[in-house]
Amino acid sequence: MRPDEIYQQSFRLIRERLGQSGAGEAEGQIVERIIHATADWDFARAMQFDPRAVPQAVHALTRQAAVIGDVRMALAGFDQTLMQELGVRAWCYVDGKTAQSEALAAGATRSAMKNRRLQADSCQEAFWGMTSENNPVPS
């Protein structure tokens, strides 16, 4: 099989196994991408969506908001080709060269330092691909 065929087959298998999840179409696609990126089927039952989440994310991405993850795996589920077409950049602050030393000096986690750096960098609008519940959600 060609790589693109393997990719499509992977999503077909995920959809078959998930069946009707009860999630909306957009939310279901997000869950599929997360499962594809992580190979963790528990996300199918664990994911919960605020009704505003998808429309706000689409709005932010179409305005070329940055995608910021607190771990690289949070960024792995994003369609890199689509992001490139939209002109959307993605990065992970927590694995930067100074992330560990800044966190140690402040007595904080690297994720907490990422949030401080985002504020210091005056990020006007960003879609935050967060993995922990103590991270802020943009309004």
Image: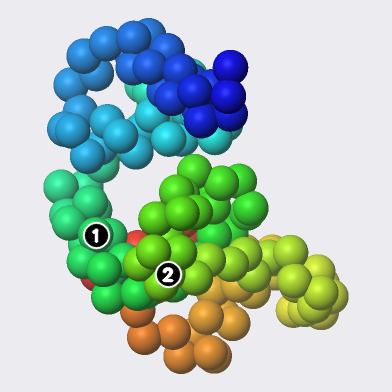
The number of numbered badges drawn on the structure is: 2
Left or right of 37 on screen, residue 66: left
Of the two numbered discs 1 and 2 in the rendering, the one whose residue sits closer to the viewer: 2
The type of residue carrying mark 2 is: Val
Left or right of 106 on screen, residue 125: left
Is residue 127 in sight in this rendering?
no
Q: Which residue is mark 2?
A: 88
Q: Residues within 10 Å of mark 2 (few under 14, many from 20)?
A: some
Give x and y (percent) for residue 74.
Answer: 54, 49
Residue depicted at x 54% and y 74%: 115
Relative to residue 86, is residue 118 depicted above or below?
below
Look at the image and tell me in which quarter the N terminus lies: top right
Give x and y (percent) for residue 20.
Answer: 21, 14
Q: Earlier in the sequence, mark 1 or mark 2?
A: 1
Q: Which residue is mark 1?
A: 58
Residue depicted at x 35% and y 74%: 64
Relative to residue 76, is residue 60 depicted above or below?
below
The type of residue carrying mark 1 is: Val
Applied colour scheme: rainbow
Relative to residue 74, is residue 124 depicted above or below?
below
Of 70 and 10, which appears nearest the observer? Answer: 10
Of 33 and 100, which appears nearest the observer? Answer: 33
Residue depicted at x 42% and y 69%: 88
Which SS class for mark 2? loop
Give x and y (percent) for residue 59.
Answer: 21, 66
